[in-house]
Amino acid sequence: MKAALIGNQNSGKTTLFNLLTGSNQQIGNWPGVTIEKKSGNIRGALGWEVVDLPGIYSLSPYTSEETVSRDFVLNESPDLVINIIDATSIERSLYLTTQILELDYPVVIALNMADIMKRKGVTVDEEKLSAKLGVPVVTISALKKTGIDKLIDAVVGCKAKTNTGKPFSPQIERAVETVQKDLTGSNRRFKAVKLLERDKLLAPVINAKVEEAAANLEKSEGMDTEQIFADARYRYIETVKTAAITVAPPKETTTDKLDKVFLNKWAALPIFAAIMALIYFLSVGVVGTLTVDLVDAGFSKLSELAGGGLIKLGASDWAASLVADGIISGVGAALNFVPQLIIMFLCLALLETTGYMSRIAFFLDRLFKRFGLSGKSLIPFIVGVGCSVPGIMSTRTIEDEDEKRMTVMLTPFIPCSAKLPIISMFGGFFFGSFAWLASLSLYFLAIAVILISALVMKKFFFKGNPASFISELPDYKLPSPVYVLRQVWERIFAFIKRAGTVILLCSVVVWFLVSFSFKFEYGVDIENSMMAGIGNCLAWVFYPMLGNWSWAATVSAFQGLVAKEQVVSSMAVIAGLAEDAAGADIFSSGVFSFFTGASAYAYMVFNLFSAPCFGAIGAMRRELGSAKKTWIAIAFQTGLAWCLATLVNAVGSLILLL
Ligand code: GDP
Ligand code: MG
């Protein structure tokens, strides 16, 4: 026994087909055309096979999909037709149904999308609809897997067609009757209507009698027969709708009301900007200024006490320095930022759990499409505010290969939480109480750079079409405190763990390289240290953006490859060792005092856009699938970062001169 699955495009045929057949499907092409052909056995219905036909809107042979579907039902004589109807656009779906009902085969109607029917305010009286159409109707949701068993029962139990109704006006019915009388074989009513419509595939069989009946009909109705039948079908559908379907204006939910504000055409972007501004203001601004000095002073004190204590206990100079200037300074420099990160993570977790993030992503979908990206690439960018690694991993949901590759390369541009220490430290010193504005400006600069890069890449390298975005969105809901706290805790814990492991190790290495010369003499002037030697070989790279020859800033930037907060830790260790004056702050130490507002911003820009840390590079490698592409991505990111930073310093220096 064979069932044909017929319905409009996007009515859920394939979803239903997969549900009905499970994994036992054969996939091939229809003879002569490249349209996919799928068939399989219906689970739990012994001896039943189902064929997924291409999505169509009518049985007229205008497109290859329509021809394929029509040929199948006319020539392969299925034992039954499952007509799937999208409950959210019943009128359009029923147009096809009226044609299917003209065939001889038994029909079972699957009324799909039951899950969103209610939300749209649509109520369908299954029994009345079934009585009106003369065939069984089963309400299902292919997505939520409801009603499927009932549908299978209906298919198995459906023996013959019961519908003998005459839906058209007496005059039209008479014309159909006249033509039908002379036909033989199956599907006579269907063929009679098509003949009257002067269907092009039936042209050879249109005889004088058919022509006369059609002409008569046209004369009395004043339009051609194709229009007459289309018109008659819609009139019939009207009566079906009145009998069985009620559409109540959908109730406005809380989500709708909130969307009116948050996703308002004009206000959505300003509100989004304001929310991000608030996040940076609270974390970098309020909490940052309150805590950094305090925590910093704490670590300085600790460093002093530890150093002094160790000396008193008889430890050697270098051991005391390792603990005080290396470990405590380096790890402390990173831990300084824990309070502001807590606030930032808290805000982000709130935005996620309330559903705001997914909804704004959906809203920005349209805007992003213009740049060759879709809402699906927005998710990585949003996740990337926490950390690039999960951000890059979430590009897996992007179907279009080109869009995915672009997104992988662009996600590290988003200021991740490890970059916040750099931004916050420089911002705090050079922009004072406007540090949060500096951070915010970098966030929006990142978005601008991402969009422009996407546009350029799209124009020259990648040609794909952005995939359309998910249709179902979570409603707004009250945040769950447990979820929020767990999110914050996990992220903070990861940060602290890095400080205690990677950053600690690196701080020791930095301390070693700064404290010793190449001849392994301890306590040399830092300008003669190994670190200075290494940095001096590479400092030319950073000269244009810093306007200064600085080995210290050079080696620190390179350490961003390990972890971005290591840039800050490295600077703290170097400055600590450079300065004899106790408690001196990083920017008043000789090695870093050259920074101006312009070069500070340039350095921030470089660290923001250059190659991400090794963890993120590994994630890029996995998602891009090749080492070569990864190298290209790194070269692109670092090259762009260098150019931007140099430009920022040049423009900034000019402004400072004025
Ligand atoms: P086809 O073009 O007829 O094969 O339709 P698909 O099976 O590809 O489905 C089109 C879209 O509608 C997909 O995004 C499905 O996830 C979605 N869809 C299918 N059935 C349902 C349903 O019952 N409810 C909802 N909400 N969505 C559905
Ligand atoms: Mg399909």
Image (tube, grey):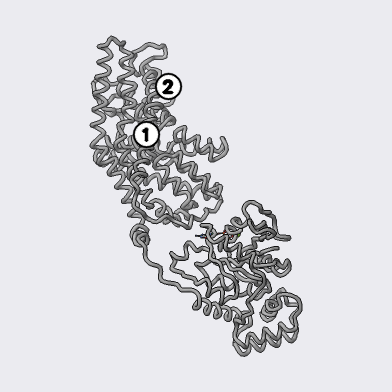
Give the Cα distance between marks 2 and 1. 33 Å
Q: What kind of residue is marked 2? A: Ile
Based on the displayed image, in which of its 4 quarters is residue 562 positioned?
Answer: top left
Which quarter is ligand 1 in? bottom right
Q: Residue at coordinates 59% horizontally, 56% vertically from top-left?
A: 19
Viewer-proximal residue, 128 or 38? Answer: 128
Q: Residue at coordinates 62% horizontally, 53% vertically from top-left?
A: 22
Query: How many callouts does the rendering have?
Result: 2
The residue that disc 2 covers is 534
* Element marked by disc 1: helix
Q: Position of residue 401 (x, y in %)?
A: 56, 47
> Of circles 2 and 1, which is in front?
1
Disc 2 to disc 1: CB gap under 8 Å: no
The residue that disc 1 covers is 493
Q: Position of residue 105 (x, y in %)?
A: 67, 71
Q: Position of residue 65 (x, y in %)?
A: 65, 65
